[in-house]
Image (tube, rainbow, N blue to C red):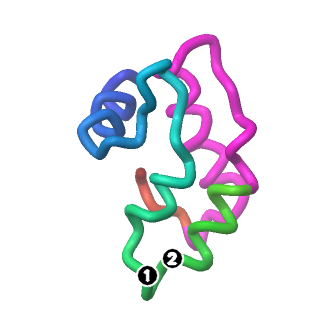
């Protein structure tokens, strides 16, 4: 689970307080493919785990559950 958190930290989407900056995550997606992914991110942004590692894992799981055909591993 923490692999994803580490990856996101390298992308700069983990805030100093350990929460996820979903706005920054959306902006990291190329504009030409952003709309469907942005709506899926917004649908899952309230997903919370016991720590940031679990939150990122559960968030990715939520993305797949929302629209598997548009799932992209973040």
**Residue ID at (37%, 34%):** 4
Q: Is residue 4 left or right of residue 54?
A: left
**Residue ID at (41%, 51%):** 74
Please tell me how crowded label 2 is: few (under 14), some (14-19), or many (20+) other residues with Cα within 10 Å: few
> As rendered, which of 49 and 24 lies closer to the eye?
24
Give the residue at the far left of this rendering: 10
Q: Name the residue under label 2.
A: 34
Q: Please state the horizontal and vertical placement of residue 46, each as a whole percent of the image.
A: 74, 38
The span picked out in magenta is 43-70
Quarter of the figure with the N terminus: top left
Please tell me how crowded label 1 is: few (under 14), some (14-19), or many (20+) other residues with Cα within 10 Å: few
**Residue ID at (51%, 33%):** 56
Determine which of the numbered discs, if any, sits on residue 43 in the image.
none
Q: Do the residues labelled 1 and 2 touch (CB within 8 Å)?
A: yes
Give the residue at the far bottom of this rendering: 32
How far is disc 1 from disc 2 in space, using C-alphas? Answer: 5 Å
In this view, 27 is above or below 17: below
**Residue ID at (32%, 42%):** 12
Queried whether the magenta region covers residue 66, the answer comes back as yes
Give the residue at the far top of this rendering: 50
In this view, 38 is above or below 19: below
> As rendered, which of 26 and 68 lies closer to the eye?
26
Q: Mark 1 points at which residue?
A: 31
Main SS, magenta region, reads helix
Q: Please state the horizontal and vertical placement of residue 32, each as a whole percent of the image.
A: 43, 87
Quarter holding residue 40 = bottom right
Q: Element under label 2?
A: helix
Q: Is residue 33 left or right of residue 12?
A: right
Give the residue at the far front of this rendering: 16
Counting every numbered tag in the picture gives: 2
In this view, 47 is above or below 54: below
Queried whether the magenta region covers residue 28, the answer comes back as no
């Amino acid at each position: 689970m923490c692999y994803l958190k580490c990856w996101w930290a390298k992308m700069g989407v983990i805030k100093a307080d350990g929460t996820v900056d979903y706005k920054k995550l959306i902006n990291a997606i190329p504009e030409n493919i952003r709309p469907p992914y942005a709506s899926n991110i917004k649908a899952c942004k309230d997903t919370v785990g016991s720590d940031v590692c679990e939150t990122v894992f559960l968030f990715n799981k939520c993305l797949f559950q929302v629209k598997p055909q548009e799932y992209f591993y973040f």
